[in-house]
Image (spheres, rainbow, N blue to C red):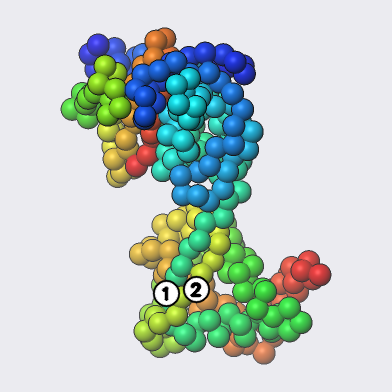
Amino acid sequence: MGFNDTKTKAIKCLEAGDYDHEARQHIDVKNLFACGQVSEEDVIRLINKTKGAQYEKSPHHFDKSVMVHIFKPMHQNATWYIKFYFIEPAAMFISVHK
Amino acid sequence: MKIVKEGDKNKAVCQFCGLQSITYALRDVPFSDNNGVVRNILAGICDKCDNVVSIPRQSTPKIKAAYNEVKRSAEYRVPAHFIDILSLASNRIDDEIGDTLSKPLLLYYLHKLNTGVISSSRLKELLASELASAPSTKRLSLKITERTEKELSSVVQKSGLQNNTDVIKGIILKIYEDIVQPKTPKHIKELKSIAATFG
């Protein structure tokens, strides 16, 4: 899946509310999305802002068969990190932070 | 919006077991900084090791409420006489409950600055004054909410100051100017009403 398809799919999952937040035995306070400090609309805006050069993907640390997507858009002089993977047909957001 | 029920199944990557099937069940889930727990929310539980692996979207409002309620410790290094200023100001407002008012007084001023009732440009001037020129040898510790952190950040931006500590120091100097120094403290009616709520 290329950058544009990944973007479109992530946004669709957010719009449909079809996602979970990853929680490694606890809720990470740095994950502003999981803690309700940024909204779905905020995350969609950030994803829309992301350019191709601000995207990377790599295998999940705990399971190499799962590809983790990372968007790093710039917004208000800060670099944001949006990390997630897909568990078809939904998304699992690992973290959204700056 | 997709809603999950207790007993529903899904898949997720568990940090111990890799990609696994999970079952949604009610759990108490702590925050990573050990500062609070979100009680009795639906969480995705690894079917292999029984650990919390995910939180469904629908649990976010409860997490947000718990997160916003949690107070986090903040420490600010200030000159020793700044602590005395807070103490003096608190006692001027209400000498029966005295120092109990120190934190509410700081938050009162912070809110007035954030909403523009008090001009934040004065803080910079006060920090350049002679009263501000002393080494910051004491620690002022406060437990503050996320909301207060946001107000602090907002005042940092509006005032052009460098950081939260400078805002706190500026506020204390403003408290000296308004409450300790004058014959009749400013805002005294409002502050006495606030003091009365401490019973």
- Whether pointer 2 and pointer 1 mark residues with C-beta atoms closer than 8 Å, the reply is yes
Q: CA distance from mark 2 to mark 1?
A: 6 Å
User: Is residue A44 in sight in this rendering?
Assistant: no
> Residue B175, how many percent across, how many down?
57, 77
Q: Which residue is mark 2?
A: B140
> Residue A16, how many percent across, how many down?
50, 15
Host chain of mark 2: B
Q: What's under tag 1, amino acid-wise?
A: Arg
Q: Quadrant of the C terminus of chain A?
A: top left
Quarter of the view holding residue B16: top left
Which residue shows up at 51% across the image and 24% down it?
B44
> Residue B170, how many percent across, how many down?
47, 73
> Which of disc 1 and disc 2 is earlier in sequence?
1
> Residue B48, how many percent across, how many down?
45, 21
- State the SS at label 1: strand
Name the disc covering residue B77, or none.
1
Quarter of the view holding residue B42: top right
Q: Is residue B178 above or below residue A23?
A: below
- State the SS at label 2: strand
